[in-house]
Amino acid sequence: MGKPDKITNDRCYPWKVTAYEAFSDLQKGPEHPEKSFTEFIQNRGGIVYYPDRDPPLYKAEFYNKDVDFSVVHAMPTGYWVYPKDCCNIMTYKEVLALKEQFRDTDSREAWVTSFWNDSILSIDQLKNNYFLVTKFFTYREFSKKGYSTTYFYSPITNCGKLIN
């Protein structure tokens, strides 16, 4: 369940990208995303990442550190970029500060969100948990800057496992 029998287009998979001058190079994106996405990514050292057979890209030792790659994933309405510093472990206080930082911004430019419901734990329990915060950029036509930033947070146990 949840795994297609066969994907015949590499565009459907995430790409590990290693050769670009600066992150702004990825932010520009291809001139014609529907026609040149694969070429754009390959020209920046992109190789297809097959999650069903390749080892995990992000390992625990990479949290709160820059890695030597970004991950780009094509979507029907644009593409997502997970930058070199995408994965961080934060306290609840730091998550609240991040939410506050983007509270007054245009809602299409920055999001701090979770599918997890904060209200199922007390404030004291939340203060004692750490959160995996994943940052990614979504490139869409409707955004004024051409992209929006999303910070997705999930609570983790003391052993580093996500709490469902």
Image: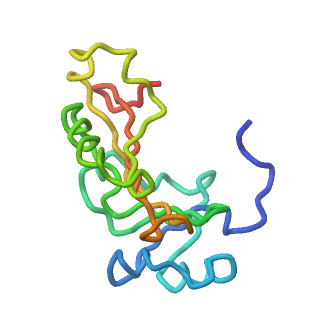
Q: Compared to 83, does 164 lie above or below?
A: above
Residue drawn at (36%, 77%) of the image: 24
Residue 38 x, y percent position in the rendering:
62, 78
Residue drawn at (54%, 67%) of the image: 15
Q: Is residue 18 left or right of residue 64?
A: right
Viewer-nearest residue: 113 or 67: 113
Residue 36 x, y percent position in the rendering:
64, 83
Viewer-nearest residue: 52 or 95: 95
Residue 152 x, y percent position in the rendering:
40, 43
Instruction: Check the image and tell me how it is coloured.
Output: rainbow
Viewer-nearest residue: 28 or 21: 28
Q: Is residue 42 left or right of residue 92?
A: right
Q: Compared to 30, does 67 lie above or below?
A: above
The mark tally for this picture is 0
Please tell me in which quadrant of the rendered image residue 23 appears: bottom left
Residue drawn at (74%, 36%) of the image: 1
Please tell me in which quadrant of the rendered image residue 156 appears: top left
Please tell me in which quadrant of the rendered image residue 11 appears: bottom right
Residue 96 x, y percent position in the rendering:
24, 35
Q: Compared to 117, does 74 lie above or below?
A: below
Residue drawn at (59%, 66%) of the image: 78
